[in-house]
Image: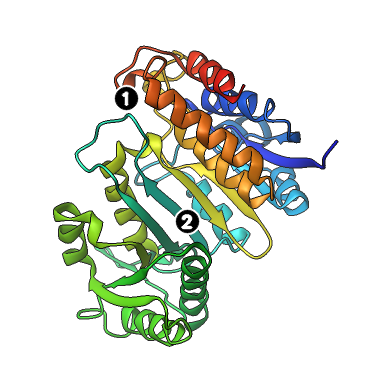
Amino acid sequence: MGKTHTITLIPGDGIGPEVTDAVVRILEVTGVQFAWERFAAGAGAFEKHGEYIPKELIASIERNRVALKGPVTTPVGGGFPSINVTLRKKFELYANFRPIKNLPGLDTRYPGVDLIIIRENTEGEYVGLEHEVVPGVVESLKVITEKGSTRIAKFAFEYAAKHGRRNIHAIHKANIMKMSDGLFLRCARDVSKGYPDITYGEHIIDNTCMQLVMNPYQYDTLLLENLYGDIVSDLCAAFVGGLGLVPGANLGAEAAIFEAVHGSAPDIAGKDVANPTALLLSSVLMLWHLGESGAAERVQTAVEKVYTEKKTLTRDVGGRAGTREFADAVIAALG
């Protein structure tokens, strides 16, 4: 019997518990041994524990160093801070990794897309430094550091070199934000010099969005600051069918959190209609991270088989199956 992996599990809210349960069921038939430490976060955790992120959850991630997380609702314009951002900052999960690739059998406007989005995950506008200067005037600070920019650039180039990616574009607005985005670019340029086999380029963020919509195939790996990466990664998800089909990973030197990147969709919670694909593919990234390459490949193949056959797809991708039925089909495809 192989090693047992103890994983911190955050089901989230809305459709989170449903898609999380589906993914756990699938993972537990892969032959990999898991022990799950389950914790609430967000409003549900506050009701039970008086904390949005319980101390026990933090201790679990510190201990296990790997977490699988469903969607957690973030209030808009008020309320508690984003659970996602808080956890990323707490554990220095500086690299947000999101592969954008079509699933077989699913028709989209952009077939054959294969993009890697690498986003700096702890700096920029998301440091949360905001204050009211005078009534009616609010100042929000964007923080870019040499350390953070160099670190994410090295991550991008190391990934590209290891996986045979052919080029990297650093995305910026240094024509306007000459100091902050300028620093980000200087760090990316310096790192690029150590990887002569990888073609390095730079594009302005607004032009990049236009270029992506016109021809996403011109890009391979995109290296972005926090806010730009947040926006562009969602834009690129549309190429392959939407956020419900795209995995996400938050990676640092001491911990990793794998999560679905879509919302909690409270309007369909509890109706057995949610698509667990995004969290399932995120769990595939987790399997790779854990060194369980065989299981990762088997789950990926099983998902692709279900999509190719088109018999048990959920409603958001043109099928009639429910969450549980989709999970059952993936389990059957695992053999």
Q: Position of residue 116 (x, y in %)?
A: 39, 57
Crowding at mark 1 (Cα within 10 Å: few <14, some 14-19, many 20+): some
The amino acid type found where label 2 is placed reads Phe
x 65%, y 65%: residue? 253
Residue 85 appears in view? yes
Q: Position of residue 41 (x, y in %)?
A: 59, 38
Rendered-image quadrant of the C terminus:
top right
Compute the Cα span from label 2 to label 1: 24 Å
User: Under tag 1, what secondary structure?
Assistant: helix
Display coloring:
rainbow
The amino acid type found where label 1 is placed reads Val
Residue 13 appears in view? no
Question: Image quarter for residue 181?
Answer: bottom left
Q: Which mark is residue 39?
A: none
x 46%, y 68%: residue? 123
Q: Which mark is residue 97?
A: 2
x 61%, y 26%: residue? 26
State the residue position of label 1. Answer: 317
User: Under tag 2, what secondary structure?
Assistant: strand
Seen from the viewer's position, the closer of residues 128 and 132 is 128
Image: 217 above or below 154: above
